[in-house]
Image (cartoon, rainbow, N blue to C red):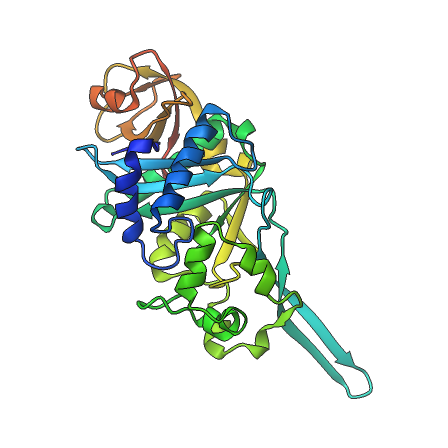
Amino acid sequence: MLVRPIQTTDLDALMALARSTGVGVTTLPANEESLARRIETSVQSIDGSASIGDANYVFVMEDADGRVVGICGIAASVGLDEPWYNYRVGTSVHASRELNIYRRLNTLFLTNDLTGTAELCSLFLHADFRHSSNGSLLSKSRFLFLAEFPERFAPKVIAEMRGVSDENGMSPFWESLGRHFFKMEFSQADYLSGIGNKSFIAELMPQHPVYVDFLSEQARAVIGQVHEKTRPALALLQGEGFQYQGYVDIFDAGPTVECMLSSIRAVRDSRVLKALEHHAADDGVTYLVSNRRLDDFRVCLVRSRLHGDGLPISAEARAKLNIQPGDEVRAVPLSAKEE
């Protein structure tokens, strides 16, 4: 498997992936015009013609036959050209000495606190390929790009995790809160947000704090919780140093996790090494390995062992990375437990 930057010729394959995501993957809507714009923005981001506020890097995963089976992305700095909304989970205290009453109530504050952060986004892997560390390769490939080109991104990185919804796309949080203000289905609001039509959020969302106790029991239970299919992705990010700091999505209340770019395990621990010709024994460590090019960035997994400042890489993996023996690569163990 190989991860590389998206190309304009990938539009049809990207549309096919988008149709299979279901509700909740807001940055991958099944809208050809929107996805074509994202591809063009990614191409411009790579060549440097996009501003940091517009820059959005999109990568795809190819199988052995060259078919696109997954996608992931990084937004360089969110909220610089349009408001970026989250709810911050907070506390409001109500007390009366005369009545001997003291109440601490959970609240939701509409904020733009995460404006200016980089965002991991659009992670999706076709169900047929969710095995053999493919998901880890797809998600963590972005960290080697961040490690190689940190100057292109904000110093803090966030990831909005998909919140709880049922098999029909019904979100308990939306039904208890959002529906009262938007008068539309969760899937429609989710779709409009995904294609960039976000003005309605500012126009319709309540600007005052929301008392959590006013919500349904089902809605309260899902605040800060992830969809069952998103749990592996959350665990992966937590293993890299990402933490939940009390921010949730305004539509489905899924958690936002965050980490300083330089503190991400795969960024911090990655090393620049020389590619060696002979492959090491099969009982080695699984490495995430990238070439160091911007316009032809490539990442794959390599089973190997370090030899000083070199990493033996098989001919097959060198072909995927488009490198020759002696070329520099960036590498890090795929997981912390292998370091």
Residue 147 position within the rendered picture, expressed as x and y whole percent measured from the top left: 48, 29
Report which quarter residue 275 is drawn in. top left
Specify whether 295 is left or right of 212.
left
Residue 221 position within the rendered picture, expressed as x and y whole percent measured from the top left: 47, 72
Q: Residue at x 31, y 49 (%)?
A: 18
Q: Quadrant of the N terminus?
A: top left
Specify whether 184 is left or right of 22.
right
Task: Please count the marks in the image.
Answer: 0
Farthest right residue in view: 98
Q: Is residue 247 above or below residue 64?
A: below
- State whether residue 336 appears in this view: no
Camera-side residue: 205 or 278? 205
Q: Is residue 75 above or below residue 285?
A: below
Q: Residue at x 50, y 35 (%)?
A: 55
Camera-side residue: 147 or 203? 203
Camera-side residue: 236 or 146? 146
Camera-side residue: 275 or 68? 68
Q: Residue at x 51, y 30 (%)?
A: 50
Farthest front residue in view: 33
Residue 177 position within the rendered picture, expressed as x and y whole percent measured from the top left: 52, 72
Report which quarter residue 15 is drawn in. top left
Q: Quadrant of the C terminus?
A: top left
